[in-house]
Image (cartoon, helix red, strand yellow):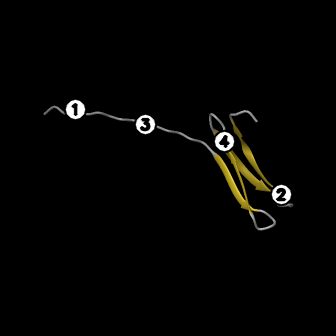
Amino acid sequence: MKQNITKLLSIIIVFSAFMVQPNLQAQWAENAVNGEHGNYGYGVTVDDDGNSYIVGRFSATA
């Protein structure tokens, strides 16, 4: 018995960085990085004053 087999392969890879945190006034502070060719978030830290920093890269015009 002969079978017709069709293999469909679709891969979509999207890299984005998004961070949400409450600020010192208990309000939500939001930020998103949206580059044209991908965003890579490698790490996040908060200093003693409550400022947050995202380490990564994006491909777009800043």
- Please tell me whether mark 4 sits on a helix, a strand or a loop: loop
Residue that numbered label 2 is attached to: 47
* Foreground residue among 5 and 61: 61
In this rendering, the label closer to the viewer, 2 or 4: 4
Residue that numbered label 3 is attached to: 10
Q: Label 4 vs label 3: CA separation?
A: 23 Å
Q: Position of residue 31 (x, y in %)?
A: 71, 51
Q: Residue at x 22, y 32 (%)?
A: 4
Q: Do the CB atoms of the residues marked 1 and 4 lie less than 8 Å apart? A: no
Residue that numbered label 1 is attached to: 4
Q: Earlier in the sequence, mark 3 or mark 2?
A: 3
In this rendering, the label closer to the viewer, 4 or 3: 4
Q: Label 3 vs label 1: CA separation?
A: 20 Å
Residue that numbered label 4 is attached to: 34
Q: Position of residue 39 (x, y in %)?
A: 65, 40
Q: Earlier in the sequence, mark 3 or mark 1?
A: 1
- Please tell me whether mark 1 sits on a helix, a strand or a loop: loop
In this rendering, the label closer to the viewer, 3 or 2: 3
Q: Residue at x 69, y 57 (%)?
A: 20
- Dot 4 amino acid type: Asn
Note whether 56 is above or below 27 in the view shown.
above
Q: Residues within 10 Å of mark 2 (few under 14, many from 20)?
A: few
* Foreground residue among 27 and 40: 27
- Give the farthest residue toward the left: 1
Q: Label 1 vs label 2: CA separation?
A: 60 Å
